[in-house]
Image: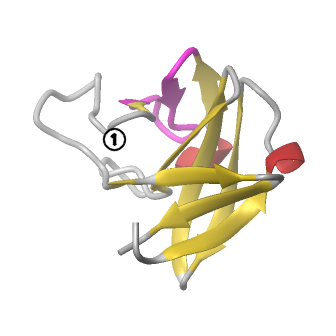
Amino acid sequence: MANLMKAADRADVSPGEGKCVQVAGKAIALFNVDGNFFAIDNTCVHRGGPLGEGSLDGSIVTCPWHGWKYDCRSGQSTSAPGKSVASYPVQVQGSDVLVDVG
């Protein structure tokens, strides 16, 4: 993880929630699943909806625009097999949530 950049404070994203953040000019959807953080592209491949504003059920985020679902741990769509968004490595250091956008 050579390009780790701060995306948020741990307290900024409560368990079971997501948040849209900017990391190195990229729109990232950051999620907290039971204290574990995951980062994927914020843009749904269906119609460009903001995934960070979607609802989270376990590790599955639902796009708020048209209901497409993604596993936030991998970026894989559960609505359309074979479709996905990029996922990014996340590391927590103290209170900082760091994302490697490569």
Task: Please tell me whether residue 18 belongs to the stretch shown in magenta.
Answer: no
Q: Residue at x 56, y 52 (%)?
A: 91
**Mark 1 — residue?**
75
Vertical side of 7 occupied by 9: above or below: above
**Residue at x 40%, y 75% (from the top left corner):** 2
Residue 85 lies, in percent from the top left, at 31, 50
In the image, residue 47 sits, relative to residue 84, either above or below, namely below
Give the dominant element type of the magenta stretch: helix, strand or loop.
loop
Residue 50 visible somewhere in the drawing? no
Quadrant that contains the C terminus = bottom left
Relative to 95, is 57 on the left or the right? left
Answer above or below: position of 76 versus 23: above
Q: Quadrant of the N terminus?
A: bottom left
Q: Amino acid at mark 1?
A: Gly
Residue 66 forms part of the magenta stretch: yes
Q: Give percent across and percent down for residue 93.
A: 70, 55
